[in-house]
Amino acid sequence: MKLSEIPALLREIGVSPVKSLGQNFLHDRNLARWMVDQANIAADDCVVEIGPGLGALTEFALSKGAGVVAIEKDQRLVKFLRGRFADRNLEVIHADAREFDIRTLYAAARVKLIGNLPYYISSQLLIKFLEYPSPIELWLLMLQKELAKRLGATPRTSDYGALTLQIQLHYRVEYLRTVSANVFLPKPDVDSAIVRLTPRRERELPACNPDVFVNLVRLGFSQRRKQLGKLMRGEGVDWETIASELALNSRARAEELSLEQWIALTNRVAPIAPERRDHEPEEHFQVVDQRDVPVGPAPRSQVHANNLLHRAVHVLILNSRGEVFLQLRARSKDRHPLKWDSSAAGHVNAGEAYETTAARELEEELGIQTALEKIAKLPASDLTDSEFICLYQGRYDGEMRLNRTEIEAGRNFPPALVDTWMGARPNEFAPGFVECWKVWRERNP
């Protein structure tokens, strides 16, 4: 849409740009086309757009053949967009993007997000839509230039801070170009910039407890001119010992530590243990025959290497809203790392009963105790990794303490969404869970 056309159109639809909503309308078509091109949109993509305004980016996203879901807060613009693109594959949601349920995006096979984010809530939207793990595979955003520089900042610069590290822990940031304020109507007071974010590769960085990481980073930058040692000692951290072990300057400030050094610091404060330490005895599983009759114990490595029949449990925990908690398996897992799985699951050890294992796994992995009901027993097969599985369910609404050695992350999901998600992205789930889910849904349609 040309600059000369916008004032008349705004008058026609009764819109006067609202500063409190960050309404600055992009009128440079070449820039809009270029920006959308940077998202590499394909016809089978689901494109989510935040703050579409008059549809400058929407038009070019739709031209790629993709379906677009646009989230717009202003009812007048919602009506305009629905009319302008009435014959196109566009869904306009009248909502505040801060309240949008991101979980629903798991129902699409591939999701990309674009948007010219309102300056006044840019940071809030970034934190929300970049929450890890995410169903989104690419973010192409126009932001206030100052904020864009913070996202991609490097150590020992004034832009480097807590937000930088919080985003870069899980995502790569590319600063693509600076955008003059002159391409907007009304013209904002500052320039903008376009950035592209993509998820980091699996195991690109060492695992760490993300909650501890964020807390340490926020503490370190709470007084950025103060030495880390003084800030850490106030929280009971043995800074001198850790700094020596990591070869850090004992007088370093927060901005001097790289992302990798912050991760290493986190792992000294809150270590994530491997599944089994070298000096620890190996677990012995209960090996069974075709009828699930015990034939004797065997070490974990032998059971898996030889596909011996053995026992396991899966537990599904539901909250009072009927949502099921799913865990994302830790990246250190020897089988199915970074796949979504039951709320808790584990092998039955030699001499242990199914129900005992279920209660133990629930406490070890989620840090909770609750009554469990046996739902079904699944036969051993290739799909269950040669495991006879007893499936249990329970109810719980309290706080969980995730075991980061076992679990990368976790979240509650409506069962109907899990059904659609499993159809759209079947490779994101551990196969044993898929079999359990089919059985559970037969009993809970």
Image (tube, grey):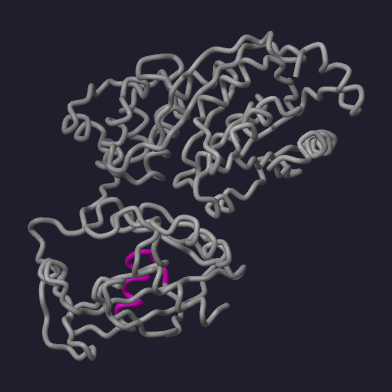
- Residue 218 appears in the picture as rendered: no
Asked if residue 338 is positioned above or below residue 35 in the image, the reply reads below
- Residue 400 appears in the picture as rendered: yes
423 to the left or right of 347: right
Residue that extends furthest to the left in the rendered view of this protein: 279
Q: x and y percent of residue 220 in the render? A: 39, 29
Q: Nearer the viewer, residue 97 or 34?
A: 34
Q: In the rendered view of the protein, which quadrant contains the C terminus?
A: bottom right
Q: x and y percent of residue 212 in the render? A: 38, 43
**Residue at (29% x, 21% y) in the render:** 252
Q: Nearer the viewer, residue 28 or 363?
A: 28
Q: x and y percent of residue 359 in the render? A: 35, 77
Q: Which residues are magenta?
A: 357-368
**Residue at (42% x, 59% y) in the render:** 426
275 to the left or right of 188: left
The main secondary structure of the magenta stretch is helix
Quadrant of residue 315 within the rendered picture: bottom left
Q: Nearer the viewer, residue 248 or 226?
A: 248
Asked if residue 67 is positioned above or below residue 372 in the image, the reply reads above
Asked if residue 39 is positioned above or below residue 361 in the image, the reply reads above
